[in-house]
Amino acid sequence: MYVIAGLGNPGREYEGTRHNVGFMVIDELAKKLGMNVTKLKFKSLVGEGNFKGEKIILLKPQTFMNSSGEALYDAVNFYKIPLENVIVIYDDKDLDLGKIRIRKKGSSGGHNGMNSIIYLLNSEEFPRVRIGIGKPQKDLVSHVLGKFEESEKKLIDEAVIKAADAVIDIIENGIEHAMSKFNG
């Protein structure tokens, strides 16, 4: 069983923003896996299904970014899932736009959603897929809550597909394989 959480903020005003790239990847995964992420559970929109014999739980926390840990904590404790089977997908301002980076574990890197998750799970020992949103040209809040420019959309759309493929690769072949295949 895997719990896969894409981080973002709920509400129409946040759709298409840099901070919601995790939600975009969950939507892409749902499409690829034939799932609907519409049930409200664990303070999240949830989709449940199976892939290659593994139960898959897709989460889009509805707690707002800085409290994402509440949703993930509830799901992890409900399913009693080992942390190596929890995959978190989120934006990273320190990666170039459209780059993805997979890690087996690590710090939050200053990302408040990850701070919340690490604090509530009391661990940094879970896989994550980061999607580069580029360095802010202005203040950080305006950058992460801003929508992608028209010129950035093709690159970010490709990154979302690549990140979804990376998550599927983690499930099928393990984190080491996915890291060597997708980390560029």
Image (cartoon, helix red, strand yellow):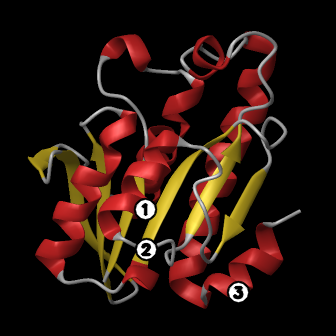
The crowd level at tag 3 (other Cα within 10 Å; few <14, some 14-19, many 20+) is few
In the rendered view of the protein, which quadrant contains the C terminus? bottom right
Return the disc, 3 or 1, that comes first in the chain's sequence: 1
Q: CA distance from mark 3 to mark 1?
A: 22 Å
Instruction: Report the amino acid beneath label 3.
Output: Glu
Q: Do the residues under discs 2 and 1 have CB atoms within 8 angstroms?
A: yes
**Residue 26 sits above or below residue 76 on the image:** above
Are the residues at dot 2 and dot 3 in contact (C-beta closer than 8 Å)? no
Q: Give the residue drawn at x 38%, y 50%.
A: 116
Query: Would residue 38 appear left or right of 158 to someone viewing this image?
Result: left
Mark 1 neighbour density, 10 Å: few (under 14) some (14–19) many (20 or more): many
Mark 1: which secondary structure? helix
Dot 2, crowdedness within 10 Å: few (<14), some or many (≥20)? Answer: few
- Inspect the image, locate mark 1, and give the three-letter code of the amino acid beneath it: Ile
What residue is shown at x 72% (from left), y 12% (from top)?
Answer: 149
In depth, the one of 136 and 57 nearer the eye is 136
Instruction: Report which quarter residue 45 is drawn in.
Output: top left
Could you give the CA–CA distance between mark 2 and mark 1, rounded to whole angstroms?
Answer: 5 Å
Relative to 79, residue 155 above or below: above
> Where does the image place residue 138, in percent across and percent down from the top left?
76, 9
Q: Label for residue 176?
A: 3
- For label 3, the SS is helix
Which residue matches tag 1? 118
Q: Earlier in the sequence, mark 2 or mark 1?
A: 1
Q: Residue at x 37, y 60 (%)?
A: 119
Q: Vertical placement of 1 versus 141: above or below? A: below
Q: Which residue is mark 2?
A: 123
* Residue 35 appears in the picture as rendered: no
Residue depicted at 18% across the width and 43% down the height:
38
Instruction: List x then y, in percent, for residue 127.
Output: 54, 72
Label whose residue precedes the other's in the sequence (2 or 3): 2
Relative placement, left or right, of 26 versus 149 is left
